């Protein structure tokens, strides 16, 4: 029997660099993990592909998924729904593989209530000026949307106290190493590994 995979929840304000850090972790020579592709009612940005960046759905389709109990969590964020399909997460954890969710704070708190043994990491910018520069520099949102996201960011940062770890994304390689160290340590926590050692004494 293999150990169940670990659920890793990475939150942090829009534009802090969650996606950038995740891509860098996937390229690093690090323990294997699977990224859970979210569902959203937001329109695809240029270059975004359905099933890779998100499952892009209409509001009606998304609400049907909620009604059918298919979502692990979901939230409204700046006028759109975002959520995590339940089936992929369960199947992947059952197969013994770690799963990474990249989600905003309201959804993360729903996951915390359902999966208290998950690892909850909050990625923070060095400051809000740097965050705005990143959102502007990414070039994916108009200024009105960027301002809404910055306002939301201040609220989200207040929620940091509900997480297990705070990681500053000042430089991507440093943030990557910090998160990797957290994941490695979490894998050694006694409740996760105790079953492996029981045979030694029984
Ligand atoms: N440490 C960093 N220093 C400077 N720029 C960064 C850093 N990390 C990421 N960026 C840049 O900031 C922008 C936003 O990054 P990214 O899209 O990864 O954020 P995100 O948190 O995933 O956003 P969202 O939640 O909106 O999907 C990108 O242009 C990225 O290149
Ligand atoms: N609660 C959830 N939040 C999610 C999910 N997938 C992404 N997100 C968060 O939404 C905002 C905006 O994302 P963007 O792609 O429009 O920039 C950002 O904070 C994401 O982390 C999800 O499944 N559930």
Image: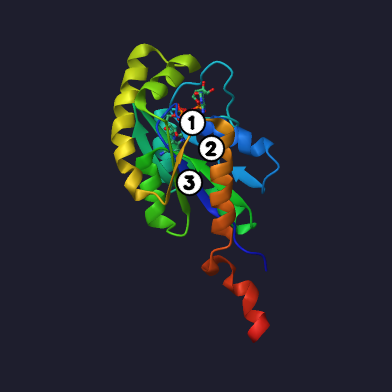
Quarter holding the C terminus is bottom right
- Does residue 140 appear in this view? yes
Determine the residue positioned at 43% across, 15% down.
Answer: 136
> Where in the figure is residue 155, as x and y percent of width and height?
28, 34
What residue is disc 3 on?
Answer: 9
Determine the residue positioned at 30% across, 31% down.
Answer: 154
- Does residue 54 appear in this view? no
Q: Is residue 123 left or right of residue 77?
A: right
Secondary structure, mark 1, is loop
The part of the image, by quadrant, that contains residue 52 is top right
Is 157 in front, or is 3? 157
Quarter holding the N terminus is bottom right
Determine the residue positioned at 48% across, 31% down.
Answer: 170
Q: Give the numbered dot on residue 199.
A: none
User: Mark 2 and 3 residues: CB-CB less than 8 Å, in contact?
Assistant: no
> Where in the figure is residue 42, as x and y percent of width and height?
44, 25
Could you give the CA–CA distance between mark 2 and mark 1, rounded to whole angstroms? Answer: 7 Å
The part of the image, by quadrant, that contains residue 152 is top left
What residue is disc 1 on?
Answer: 170
Is 176 in front, or is 73? 176
Could you give the CA–CA distance between mark 3 and mark 1, rounded to whole angstroms? Answer: 19 Å
What residue is disc 2 on?
Answer: 175
């Amino acid at each position: 029997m293999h150990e169940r995979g670990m659920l890793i929840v990475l939150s942090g304000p829009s534009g802090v660099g969650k996606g950038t850090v995740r891509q860098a972790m996937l390229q690093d020579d690090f323990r294997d993990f699977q990224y859970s592709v979210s569902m959203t009612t937001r329109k695809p940005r240029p270059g975004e592909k359905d099933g890779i960046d998100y499952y892009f759905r209409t509001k009606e389709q998304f609400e049907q998924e909620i009604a059918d109990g298919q979502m692990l969590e979901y939230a409204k964020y700046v006028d759109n729904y975002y959520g995590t399909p339940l089936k992929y997460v369960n199947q992947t954890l059952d197969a013994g593989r770690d799963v990474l969710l990249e989600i905003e704070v309201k959804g993360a708190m729903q996951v915390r209530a359902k999966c208290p043994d998950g690892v909850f990491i909050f990625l923070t910018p060095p400051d809000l000026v740097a965050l705005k520069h990143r959102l502007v520099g990414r070039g994916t949102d108009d200024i009105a949307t960027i301002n809404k996201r910055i306002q939301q960011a201040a609220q989200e940062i207040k929620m940091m106290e509900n997480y297990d770890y705070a990681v500053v994304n000042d430089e991507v390689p440093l943030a990557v190493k910090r998160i990797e160290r957290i994941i490695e340590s979490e894998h050694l926590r006694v409740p996760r590994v105790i079953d492996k050692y029981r045979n030694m004494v029984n």
